[in-house]
Image (spheres, rainbow, N blue to C red):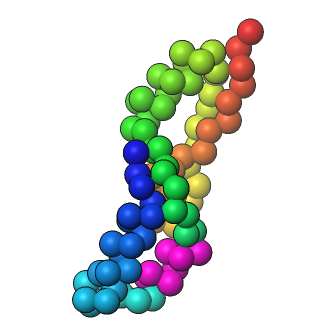
């Protein structure tokens, strides 16, 4: 579980002390979110899908470094 509010606050402090470029933080602010964010490991996520009765396919976008960390899933409920 990631507390995004804490993560953003820490990054803002890093900018203040020169440990992070302000430009990077400006990019981060485009996705500013202060709630909790659950990003399970892929094996846990896929096990959750199976247990919930879903079939799925995944793909990874190209072009941005971080795309490889967030594959897209196409899920269909098995009956």
- Kindly identify the residue that appears in the image at 53 percent across and 76 percent down: 29
Magenta segment, principal secondary structure? helix
Q: Position of residue 58 (x, y in %)?
A: 58, 37
Q: Which residues are magenta?
A: 24-30
**In the figure, is residue 20 to the left or right of 51?**
left
Q: Residue at x 42, y 29 (%)?
A: 44
Depicted 36 relative to depicted 16: above or below: above
Q: Is residue 31 left or right of residue 15?
A: right
Residue 53 screen position, x and y as percent? 63, 15
- The answer to whether residue 27 is left or right of residue 17 is right
Q: Does the segment drawn in magenta span residue 75?
A: no
| Count of marks, rendered view | 0
- Residue at x 49% of width, y 50% of height: 37
Farthest residue, direction top: 79
Q: In the image, is residue 19 above or below residue 42?
A: below
**Image quadrant where residue 32 sits:** bottom right
* On-image quarter of the N terminus: top left
Q: Image quadrant for the C terminus?
A: top right
Tell which of 33 and 60 is nearer to you: 33
Is residue 55 or residue 30 the one in the foreground? Answer: 30
Give me the residue at 50% from left, 74% from top: 28
Where residue 3 sits: x, y (%)? 42, 55
Task: Residue 8 in the image: state x and y as whole percent.
Answer: 42, 70
């Amino acid at each position: 579980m990631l507390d995004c509010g804490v993560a953003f606050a820490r990054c803002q402090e890093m900018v203040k002390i020169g440990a992070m470029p302000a430009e990077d933080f400006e990019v981060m602010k485009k996705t500013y979110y202060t709630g909790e964010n659950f990003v399970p490991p892929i094996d846990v996520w896929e096990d959750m899908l199976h247990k919930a009765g879903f079939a799925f396919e995944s793909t990874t976008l190209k072009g941005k470094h971080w795309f490889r960390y967030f594959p897209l899933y196409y899920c269909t409920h098995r009956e």
